[in-house]
Amino acid sequence: MNAPPPTLIGEITAKLGKKWSSWLFAGLAISATGFGVLCLAVLLFVVARDGLGGLDWNFITSFPSRKPEDAGILAALMGTLWVMGLTCLFFVPVGVGAAIYLEEFARRNWFTKLIETNISTLAGVPSVVYGLLGLAVFVFGMNLGSSIVAAAATLTLLVLPITIVASREGLRSVPPSMREAAMALGATKWQAVWHQVLPAGMPAVLTGIILALGRAIGETAPLIAMGAFTSVFFVPTSPTDTFTVLPIQIFSWVARPLPGFQENAASGIVALLIVLLLLNSVAVALRYMYARRRSW
Amino acid sequence: MAFLFLCAVLSVVTTAGIVVVLLAEAIPFFTHVNIFDFLTGTEWRPLFANKSFGALPLLSATAMIALMAMAVAFPIGLLTSIYLSEYAPSWIRETVKPALEVLAGIPTVVYGFFVISFIAPTIVRPIFHSETIFTALGASLAMGIMLIPMVASLSEDAMRAVPNGLREGAYALGANRFQVSVKVVVPAALSGIVAAGLLALARAIGETMIVTIAAGGIPNLSGNPLEPMQAMTAYIMEVASGDTARGTVEYQSIFAIGMLLFIFTLGLNLIARWFIGKFREEYE
């Protein structure tokens, strides 16, 4: 019988003995896992250390300023709320609509397959490329300028793939018996989907929506690519106003050398993370609420 | 019904829109700049009087930063996924996975800040004695951390899809957990793991804010990771945040760079999907 060819793993095992090599590997794997968690802890610590001190009422209610101690995030916070509100209005109906079509109504043919492949490929397109799309189509093509509505349209295209994939999974988790039972009682396909399947799949659909919104809130690059402003000294009052958002405000502070602005950036990050945290708690609460009603 | 259909079709329209928009500006760009000079030129001076559009400095910076980020993210992510899938008791898995999800959900502008305020001054500078805090290395370390959760979760999915019969068969032959993980589960999940790496690499190439904030933003064709560099995405940010008029060569150049980004990431995604398809064939 031929001896098996020597491999790195084989050699290590032979030198250390089966038991020790196993322990060594387990140690490595545990340290790698710990490293990721440690990075998260250090990152949050650094942000809190630099940012908590500056996060006061004054910071939330002030406009940007040349003096770091006077600067605040009012315009950015309001801009984020405006852009996110409008983005929600766009992507929720379109994303859930596309998911319902693909999961419940679409025939299995080449066109459906094309749409599906296309959605998963779109999810891998860099966000800055969506920014270029928004720049050419919404800002210049439709003459919307670097406005809130142009930003919301760009972000909608960016988060649609995530929304569609998550919503489809939610709908797929609803057992076919629910559809069959509804239709056996005389409901049309539409009624079955609208009154039975969609409510039953709602927790996962909502999770998908909130995941997508969380992604949209943190996006900086596509909005800068479509020409969003970095310093805005007013609160937007209409969808066609120019705007800035929290991540852009943070970016403009990070880019300045004065230490005071670095602290402003950190405080802005704390505010941004708090917004994201609130959003995620809403997701958890909604999931919990719906999960209690679910009985299969 | 027609509305639902239109919603689904919008995704195809988006892709078509991206291709059309990129081509519409990139084609006029290539009438000013020879495409061969663009791809092989070593001088990138778009904003000076004597313009030069050789994209190699940007391409090499993107490649270098992305590969160094993968050198951090791939081994650590893979080991994490092996631990979570094969070793960890369920309570650890239930705690670590949400923590990694949080890490993945942190906006990239925050990672940029993290390089400037922590990674560069306390790790890169003291250890490697870089001249400035804006280095390719600093950016790629943060990017590596950012990509760990992606590699870990995608390869864990692949490992969990490996049928338990394979593990049990190996245990029955006297293998221990280490041998089962490394010699049975990892090879069985290999195409899924390769796909995870490719998708993470595509993400690294397209990542924008970390390189814009932390890598220095100076076009620089160099092999030294301790120097400032400008990645492709960072160049797009530089031009977009300035006031370059529409129709100028600079304006068109960001679409040409955008098209290269689109081609690279699309290619990597398609190859990754092929690997995932292969993996599914094996076990379904």
Image (tube, rainbow, N blue to C red):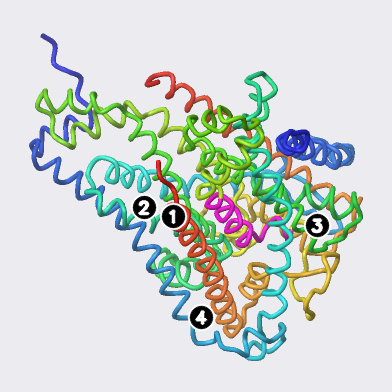
Please tell me whether mark 3 sits on a helix, a strand or a loop. helix
Q: Amino acid at mark 1?
A: Glu
The residue tagged 3 is: A150
In the picture, the disc for residue B68 is none
Q: Which residues are magenta?
A: A206-224
Q: Left or right: where does residue A19 sit relative to residue A181?
A: left
In the picture, the disc for residue B97 is 2
Chain letter of disc 1 in the image: B
Please tell me whether mark 4 sits on a helix, a strand or a loop. helix
Q: Is residue A214 magenta?
A: yes
The residue tagged 4 is: A51
Could you confirm whether marks 1 and 2 are on the same chain? yes
Task: Calculate the distance from the C-alpha at mark 2 to the C-alpha at mark 4.
Answer: 27 Å
- Foreground: disc 4 or disc 1: 1
Residue projecting furthest to the top: A1
Q: Main secondary structure of the magenta part?
A: helix
Q: Position of residue A288 (x, y in %)?
A: 43, 57
Task: Calculate the distance from the C-alpha at mark 3 to the C-alpha at mark 2.
Answer: 36 Å
Q: Residues within 10 Å of mark 1 (few under 14, many from 20)?
A: few
Looking at the image, can residue B36 be seen?
no
Q: Left or right: where does residue B157 sit relative to residue A66?
A: left
Taking the spot 82% from the left edge, 59% from the top edge, the residue there is B48
Q: Left or right: where does residue B281 sit relative to residue A105?
A: left
Chain letter of disc 4 in the image: A
Q: Amino acid at mark 3?
A: Ala
Callout 2 touching callout 4 (CB < 8 Å): no
Callout 1 touching callout 2 (CB < 8 Å): yes
